[in-house]
Amino acid sequence: MTARQQWTIVLGIVALLAVLLAAATHYLGDELFPVSVGSAAPPMQASTVDGTKRMKTLADYKNKVVLLNVWATWCEPCRVEMPSIEKLHRTYGPQGLAVVAVSVDDAGMEDRVRDFAKELGLTFEILHDPSRTTSASYQITGYPETFIIARDGTIRKKVIGAADWSSEANRALIRELLGSATASR
């Protein structure tokens, strides 16, 4: 076997490995790169439901601590946890907490999403993502699912299911991330 043939075989093997790596990344991306505590928050894009229909991304909340909640109007646990999220927002929103609730209700359900927010007296940002791209990006396994994202874009907490966001443990984490550990409770 000549040196040229040997190099052809080596290059063929390298090319095959590159194709296999690309395929594995594409088809097994969620398993290879899970969205978890300590990882960078993936991109997010959803539209406002306040009548102006603007697209918002995670970059719109730069330099803020973000509570990203993915939910739906038909989800009873979502309804249960929303008042505690509102309480957290009212306490820490002025200090730099951005509460962003992304509804995954179907297209055309903007009125229902707005009515839900109005009924519960929600004053934080409500977005709508009927294509569920946020669910895919964040590897959502059920609703609600919530992520606390630090100012540097790192996921600091992930909660699957409803939680009491006004609990002392959750408030302490928010205070820590806001840099106000001794802030009023």
Image: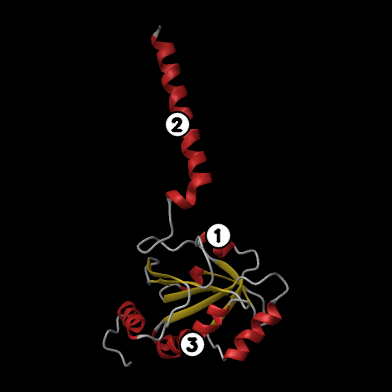
- Give the camera-side residue of 144 and 7: 144
The picture places residue 25, in percent across and down from the top left corner, at 48, 44
The picture places residue 91, in percent across and down from the top left corner, at 41, 90
Q: Residue furthest top?
A: 1
The picture places residue 12, in percent across and down from the top left corner, at 47, 23
Q: Earlier in the sequence, mark 2 or mark 3?
A: 2
Disc 1, SS: helix
The Cα–Cα distance between marks 2 and 1, rounded to whole angstroms, is 27 Å
Packing grade of label 2 (10 A; few <14, some 14-19, many >=20) is: few
Point 48% across, 49% down: residue: 29
Disc 2, SS: helix
Task: Tell me the residue that label 3 is attached to.
Answer: 86
Image mark count:
3
- Give the camera-side residue of 85 and 90: 85
The picture places residue 138, in percent across and down from the top left corner, at 50, 62
Name the side, left or right, on which 62 lies relative to 179. right
Question: Which quadrant is the C terminus positioned in?
Answer: bottom left
The Cα–Cα distance between marks 2 and 3, rounded to whole angstroms, is 50 Å
Disc 3, SS: helix
* 62 vs 89: above or below: above
Point 52% across, 73% down: residue: 144
Q: Which mark is residue 136?
A: 1
* 109 vs 117: above or below: above
For badge 3, the amino acid type reads Glu
* 4 vs 181: above or below: above
Task: Tell me the residue that label 2 is attached to.
Answer: 17
